[in-house]
Amino acid sequence: MIRNALAALALPFRATPLVAGVTLALTVFAGAAPAGGAWLTMLLVDSLTSGTASPGRAAFLAVASALAGGLAIALLYLGGHLGEVVQQRVAVTVESRLFQRIATLPGLRQLEDPAFHDRLRLAEQAAQEAPGTISQFTQEVVRSVVLLASFAGALLVVWPPMTLLLLASVVTAVFARLATARREAATEEAWVATDRRRLFYRALLTDVRAAKEIRLFGLGGLLHSRMVSSLETVSGARLAAARRGTLVQSGLALLGAVVAGAGTVVVAVNVVSGRSSVGDLVLFLGAVAGVQTGLSGVVLQLGEAGRAVRLFGHYLDVLDTRDDLASGRETPAAAAIELRDVWFRYAEDGPWVLRGVNLTIPAGAAVGLVGVNGAGKSTLVKLLCRFYDPQRGTITWGGTDIRSLDLAELRRRIGVVFQEFMAYDLTAAENIGIGQVSSRDDRAQIVAAASVAQISGVLEALPDGYDTVLSRTHADSDERTGVTLSGGQWQRVALARCLMRTDASLMILDEPTSGLDAEGEHRVHDTLRLHAEGRTRLLISHRLSALRGADLIVTLVAGQISECGSHDELMDADGEYARLFRLQANGYQDARVG
Ligand SMILES: Nc1ncnc2c1ncn2[C@@H]1O[C@H](COP(=O)(O)OP(=O)(O)OP(=O)(O)O)[C@@H](O)[C@H]1O
């Protein structure tokens, strides 16, 4: 908690040191001004009641006390505005650092971990709420501490025990409020998974990609009721925490009133008996009201701030997330890739997905990877891209373990069309250009890649050509709604994106042709053969005829390589590949006969 609070307090001074410093100074003045005003009022009342005041002195004291009051208000507003400036700067810094950490996570482990997503949600909440709450609170605390100290000094003069009584009631209030805040933050943490489910159902209900199934299968009611049930659970828990907080608050307010009332009685009796002046009573009443108002602000905000500080811990935890993969330093060479006894599973207690894979992918060769659903083909691709490290065995590029290679450099050498490639809500040109971020504005290269992927004619014919936004949900900067491509057309866009990687020495196409028609599939393979000549190609497809021309075909069965060879060799061997190939060929023949 202390680590979180210190880190949160340091933020304004890191984000904008000068403005934060000026704000702090103003806040100190704003805190001292009310006590100064009350002191001047006491002098005025005493000089009037004692009958010793000259008109000039009385007028001076009246004006000075009014000015002190005015100054307090002006400083409060100015401090408030500067506080807003600090908050905005801090908000940008906090959000930027959070998402920078997420963007630079090298592997996929954290993003696949539900616990990390829960922490991330709390961190995002903290990033949005904490900067404002904590800077406001800091200002309020500084102002109140100065206010309390200055009034406490004044009270010491009038009736010393009252200072102690007030301080005791303040300490009680602070601790009670902190306990409530802790409970509120714990509620938030306990229900974050439920809240994540609510957001998931909410996102599904508005997701255009899910809209077809939701309508056809009539899922709207089910998703809606699950969303509302999660919402009600979370909201009930929050209400229960708030109820406890209100009870504590009311008790504390009562305690404060009793202390103030008792003090007022004592000072009033002193005035009557001549031990104190009327000015003392005025100062006392001003001090009690000032301290209680100031402190009630702090105590009220204390809850919010305590909760924000606790949530801020999750933000710091996300920033401190350790990389799941360590980058090496060596540069990959365009040479053979070898997998030696590679074992991999996604979770420590999960089933092995790859079990002792040994495979050599010769440099410049076209290798076809075949296997039934779940055999581990896409997993092997993810290991080649080093999204995970195998638990056992090694993967080498030109004899160097890929763990020793510079991670960014390794990925620069790979072009992939993933099975679940992304359809970005961006323009057609951007959708292709981002395949090579440094060339994303190079229209000639983009058009060339689109031509090779045989999609340039379709893109040119769009309302704004390559500048058309490929989205039904996002409009472009001129508020023109975008367009949607067909599944096969999107696949060609993804292929063009991959072809932007002119430096890639390994091209991976994970089922690149499944959305293409038969003629299109042939053309893609022919063009790839020509375009990617000399580069290593790993082709995954369930249409075995598409892989027939590969230099080497590898069959993966339940995470193990069962066969390896050319099409002819595997057909002669009459194993799993030959069985699958004949099954498909017969299917086509039957279709023709039918
Ligand atoms: N991120 C993941 N976390 C946990 N398990 C996973 C993950 N991705 C894949 N798996 C599991 O690993 C196994 C192999 O999946 P993989 O996607 O590699 O198969 P595949 O051969 O590419 O299948 P398909 O032909 O259906 O694409 C499957 O049992 C799958 O459930």
Image (cartoon, rainbow, N blue to C red):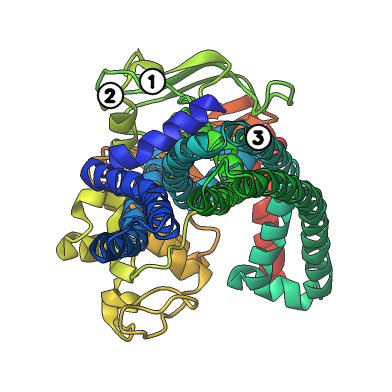
CB atoms at circles 1 and 2 under 8 Å apart?
yes
- In this picture, residue 250 sits left or right of residue 138: right
Q: Quadrant of the N terminus?
A: top right
Q: Secondary structure at mark 1?
A: helix
* Type of amino acid at the residue the image marks with label 1: Ile
- Seen at 37% across and 34% down, the residue is 10
Tell me: 313 left or right of 173: left
- Which of the numbered marks, if any, corresponds to residue 402? 1
The 10 Å Cα crowd at callout 3, few under 14, some 14 to 19, many 20 or more, is some
Q: List x then y, in percent, for residue 446.
A: 23, 62
Neighbor class of circle 1 (other Cα within 10 Å; few <14, some 14-19, many 20+) is many
Q: Is residue 198 above or below residue 115?
A: below
Q: Nearer the viewer, mark 3 or mark 2?
A: 3
Q: Which mark identifies residue 165?
A: 3
The C terminus appears in which quarter of the rendering?
Answer: bottom right
Q: Which residue was labeled with disc 2?
A: 332
Q: Could you tell me residue 420's position as x and y percent?
A: 54, 52
The span from disc 3 to disc 2 (Cα, nearest Å) is 73 Å
